[in-house]
Amino acid sequence: MVKVLIVDDSLFARKILTDILNSDKDIEVVGVAKNGKEALEKIPILKPDLVTLDVVMPIMDGIVTLERIVDKYDIPVIMVSDLTQEGATLTLEALDKGAIDFIPKPKNIFSLNNETIKTQIIDKIKISAQCNVHVKPVIKEPKSIPERAALTGKTSKDGFDYIIAIGSSTGGPKALQQVLPLIPKNINGSIVVVQHMPPKFTKSLAQRLNEISSINIKEGEEGEVLKRGHCYIAPGDFHMEVVKRGSEYVIRLNKDSPIKGLRPSVDVLMDSVARLDSIRKIGVILTGMGSDGSKGIVSIKQSNGFTIAQDEKTSVIFGMPKSAINTNHVDKVVPLDEIAYEITRKVEVL
């Protein structure tokens, strides 16, 4: 039984989330609080296994409350965030400060009662309650890349020999902060990423990552030509693919049906990269719940690509890496702080 404390200043939100979670036999809402101060008073009494925490509240907001929970307790926290640009910015800050995941709060709060959304929320609560809350960011100097023979590949300003496809979900924003900033700007490749997030959130994520990285990171756009030393993050609610147009590799976005309830899908991105000719490929699976990316990893490997998965010890949730590893098509399983090294060692720099 997963015991949950719901913290939200909206009476409607508290009631709807309580009804959703109590509808599952393995979850019990042990209490509610209307602000952070009240939540901190109730945690030592109710001893919840997980806290859902509204981002914007009076008296004590979600960010301050989160910091105090993380500092004092080993309790997973899931943020409940408005689908606004401000909500996205604050949620990403919360993920940086130790929140495990977030539940999007639509403008019409009653739409949370949609059966698909209810199932997703229940699954997220159950899995997050079992996550590795002890995973902390490990900031290391990147290993030096061994000397390699002179490259014979493309040497034009934007040309490259590799496409690196990365997939991540729960714990992914923080994991990407420990991978992408360590990629050198002169890498002989272009990077495409699927991080499971709604619209607005992916744009904010790209902007935050770009500020701390040497490579250029942005949200991918329809028809955009891939460039060396650039990273493109799939926009929320769009599948992202890479197709060949003449000698160039181009981003294609679509709103085809969600795969396993997900759009964007890691499998869709990796399958498209696997189909490309005259380019080398690397597939990387980072922390996340579910199995998205396991099919894509097989496609990348079968197209003579190189595949990497994050290890269990450094994963917030080992679902996606485990599913990829279980396909027997993963070449290297390494800790998070070695992912960038493995990519760069394989790809080389120009």
Image (tube, grey):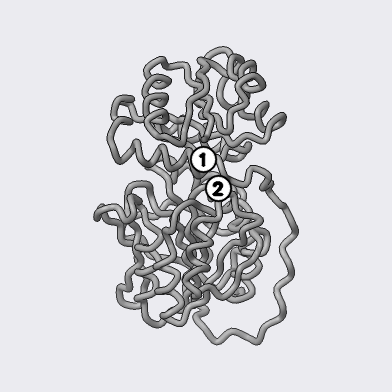
> Where 255 sits versus 225, above or below?
above
Residue 9 marker = none
Q: Position of residue 285 (x, y in %)?
A: 51, 62
The amino acid at mark 2 is: Gly
Q: Quadrant of the C terminus?
A: bottom right
Q: Secondary structure at mark 1?
A: strand
> Where 311 sits versus 20, above or below?
below
Among numbered discs 2 and 1, the one appearing first in the sequence: 1
The amino acid at mark 1 is: Asp
- Classify residue 203 by image quadrant: top left
Q: Which residue is mark 2?
A: 171
Q: Secondary structure at mark 2?
A: loop
Image position of 336 (left or right of 323): right
Identify the residue shown where x is 67% and y is 33%.
70
List the single residue furthest toward the left.
Answer: 256
Q: Position of residue 219 (x, y in %)?
A: 42, 51
Give how far apart the Cα atoms at labels 2 and 1 are.
7 Å
Within 10 Å of disc 2 (Cα), the crowding (few <14, some 14-19, many 20+) is many
Within 10 Å of disc 1 (Cα), the crowding (few <14, some 14-19, many 20+) is many
Identify the residue shown where x is 45% and y is 30%.
81
Q: Position of residue 214 (x, y in %)?
A: 61, 57
Identify the residue shown where x is 50% and y is 44%.
127
Residue contact at pointers 2 and 1, CB within 8 angstroms: yes
Image position of 339 (left or right of 138): left
Q: Which residue is mark 1?
A: 101
Q: Position of residue 78 (x, y in %)?
A: 52, 34
- Classify residue 15 by image quadrant: top left
Image position of 156 (left or right of 111): right
* Front residue of this view, candidates 45 and 194: 45
